[in-house]
Every structure is written in C-alpha cells, then in structure tokens.
Image (cartoon, rainbow, N blue to C red):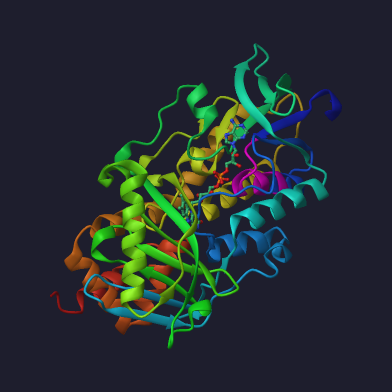
Amino acid sequence: MADPRDFPARVLIVGAGPTGSTTALALKKYAPYVQVTLIDKSSFPRDKACGDGLGPGARRTLERLGLTDLLDGFNRPISVGVTGPDGTEAACSGPLIGEKDLSGFVAPRLDFDNRLLQECIRQGVVVRTEERFKELEELATGQIRVISEDLRSSQMLAGTYEFVIAADGAYSAVRRFIKSPTAKKSKTYIAMRSYASISHPSVAVAETIRLDFIDAFLPAYGWCFPVSDGRANIGVGLPVAQLRNGDQSLRQLLDHYYDDLRRRGFKVGSPELVKSHQLPHAAARLRMAYGHVLFLGDAAATINPFSGEGIFYGMAAGVQLAEQLSQVSPGPDANWARELRLFEHAFKRRFRRHFMSSYAVHLIFKSRRWTNKIVRAAAKNREVMATGASIMFDEGTITPRLIFRALGTGVH
Ligand SMILES: Cc1cc2nc3c(=O)[nH]c(=O)nc-3n(C[C@H](O)[C@H](O)[C@H](O)COP(=O)(O)OP(=O)(O)OC[C@H]3O[C@@H](n4cnc5c(N)ncnc54)[C@H](O)[C@@H]3O)c2cc1C
C-alpha cells in the first residue's frame, strides 16, 4: 500500500480574504490530509472596501464550520427597509421572513477578516502575511512552483504545491499572470463605501438594513448597514459601464445619497474612511479551473449580479471544495486537475439558477417602472420580500409565484 507521506497534498492559497481563510478552515475540517499554506500581501488587520453585510448564506456557512463565535459582538439587524424610486417604502421585521431565517450580520471587514485569519492560525494553518504572489510555473510532474515576495525583506521565496487556490480578489494577480480572461465592464460593478454617524427621530436605524433604489443608482442601490455605536456603513454602487470620471463621479453619487438620506429626515455625519473597489459578478461566467490552479471568490467573479454580495459565494465555494476533497485519498491515483475541474462543474451547477435569477432581476431593475412595481409588491406581501431577500443574500431563485405576485399590482 502507498505511503501517503510519499504523495503529499500541499496547497497554496493566495489571498486571506473571507474566501481564502474560509477555504483553509474548511480544508482543515473536511480534508485534513491537505497541507495548507495561506499567503496575503497585506499586513492584518487590513481594511477592505465592502458594505460589511453578511447575509444568511454566509451566516449558515460559518455555522456549518462551527465558527459562529467569530460573529460575537457584531450588529445583527432585525429589519429590512427598501425604498423604490417613487418613494415607496417596503419594510419587514423579524429574523424570520415567511418560513426563512434571513437574518445576517454587519461585520466590518477590518475586524471580520482578521478574526477568520486568527482562527486559521489557531487551527494550525501555515499563514504568511506581507507576502505577495509573483509568478507560477507548472512543472513536468504536474506540480506548481510558485514564486512570491516577502514584502518585509524584499526576498523572493519559492515553493512547490500539488495545487494552488487563487482567492486574491477582484484584481487577481494570479489571473493576470496566467493571462486568463477577466470580467468585461458590462459584468462588473464599482462601489464606494464610507462610515458615518446616523440617527432618525422615528426609525430604529441600528436595527434596520436599508436598501435604497433611488433613480440615480438604478439598477443598483444605495445601502445603509448599521454597524454599532450609532454608525453605519453607507455606500453606493453602479455598473462600471455607467461610470464617468472614475472615483470622482462615484464620490458625487455617494454625496447625493447622503443628501437623499438627510432629505428623508436622517441625521447623517460626514463620510469617513471612503473607499472603493470593483465587483466582477457572476454573469461574467469566468472559468475557475486551469489545470492545477483554481480561482475562487472575487477572483472567479462569483459575486451576486444583483446585490453585489460576494462573501457568501466565496466562502460557500471553499466549503464545497473541501467537502469534495474529503472523498479523495492522497495517493498515486489522486488527480488534482480532475478534482478541480469537477469542482467547477458542481459549483456552477449549484448556483446556476440562482445567479441567472439575480442577473434577470438586475436587468429588470434597469427599468424605473418595474423597480417601482416590485418594491410596491414587496411592501404589500412578505413573500415577495422574502424571495427578493433570498435572491439578494442567499440562494433564492425567481419563482412563478413571485412573478404572479409582482404582476398582481398595477404598473404606474
Ligand atoms: C464597496 C463594496 C461593498 C460591498 N458590500 C458587500 C456586502 O455588504 N456583502 C458582501 O457579501 N459582499 C460585498 N462586497 C463584495 C465583497 O467585498 C467581496 O465579494 C469579498 O471581499 C470577496 O472576498 P475574497 O476573499 O474573494 O476577496 P478579497 O476580500 O478581495 O480578498 C483578497 C485578498 O487577496 C490579497 N491579495 C491580492 N493580491 C495578492 C497577491 N498578489 N499576493 C498575495 N495576496 C494578494 C488581498 O490583500 C486580499 O486580502 C462589496 C464590495 C465592494 C467594493
């Protein structure tokens, strides 16, 4: 019988965002034979432009890994408020909408990503921060040789792995290195977040996730996700193709959103820690597996095309991969390239209808008329709200019932 020590399963994960760290933790749990090394060019804790919203899918993924304590102390809003372009307000309270527990958290990334990374270290993952991926080469043996740079000493480091997981985000250096296609502008959002103090005389701001589909943002929205201490993560996004003058016009949109909130009676402080980043979304349908290299998370453009949520899909991919690899014995017959290819098929099969539904809703929300109609339907019917929320933040799909309910209100 083959000695497993003769057939190591060494994997390098590039990028310690939620995708990379969760994948490392899932491999520890489900495929402990894999020897994981996790590198990131940043020094942690590090900030990341994000709305900080962890939806029900992300919460369940952490529950599955037995890591819910990582969410301790983060705000857990219990209500959702949605505004349509004509000013219609749809509101819903309680973590359970219909039969579904759609509750989530608002977890500032500076803290959340660091908690995940510290958990990786605690569980024995080899973690090296301030180390930048530079290049890779597929050896005749099928293994991957990776060169990275220790940013503290400027020293080049080399390592050999059975496979590499590129979880290095929207501007993936690994994807650029292997010259694989990236998402087109028409399949990419850009979004800007800020933090500010916020209150309202009659709205429980700390308890409510706000999504505002006002004219200037369609088919995207402005968000106000309460963090803690009377502050919220407030931001705006829009398709890159709609953007003029880069960050400048994004900043104008953000200021416009602040003005809009003030006009509606919110007392909002000045925007702080303003930061933007791109969001390549799942309608880009990028290839994930290239031989012994697999792209996950934003590096694979698995962001929800309607909501811009990406954390859940990156985390879910890591868990699904680890579960699949739990069935593999690391011996002479292990065929990593085949496993990565099979994973890509399975992941895409799992999310195909969901991503198609969220892309369809994104297209529908280009129309002001239809956006009004759907927000009105959500205001009248909790089921529409629940389905909408699960298309945005979970694995929901458009159902005939949803179409019927949406069509059931008059178009104005
Ligand atoms: C403004 C904004 C708001 C958003 N709001 C939400 C939200 O509320 N909820 C949600 O779910 N999603 C949201 N998203 C999307 C979400 O931020 C991403 O989907 C998520 O960060 C993806 O995680 P990731 O781990 O794949 O990539 P990232 O979080 O980008 O992590 C990639 C990591 O790779 C590292 N890295 C990059 N290059 C290298 C290299 N060469 N060598 C080594 N390391 C490298 C980086 O330092 C980084 O730590 C938002 C995005 C934006 C821009």
| Image quadrant in which the N terminus is located | top right
Does residue 356 appear in this view? no
Q: Determine the residue positioned at 37% across, 52% down.
A: 305
Kindly report the secondary structure that dominates the magenta region of the rendered protein: helix
- Determine whether 85 is above or below 140 in the image: below
Please provide percent x and percent y for residue 68: 70, 65
Quarter of the figure that contains the C terminus? bottom left
State whether residue 78 is above or below residue 311: below
Task: Return the residue found at the far left.
Answer: 412
Of residues 18 and 296, the one nearer the viewer is: 18
Q: Position of residue 167 (x, y in %)?
A: 58, 39
Q: Quadrant of residue 334?
A: top right
Magenta region: which residues?
14-25
What's the residue at 27%, 66% (across, down)?
214
Residue 131, x across and y down, in percent: 69, 31
For this rendering, which residue is in front, 349 or 84? 84
Residue appearing at x 48%, y 26% in the figure: 176
Q: Is residue 319 left or right of residue 184?
A: right
Which quadrant of the figure has residue 399? bottom left
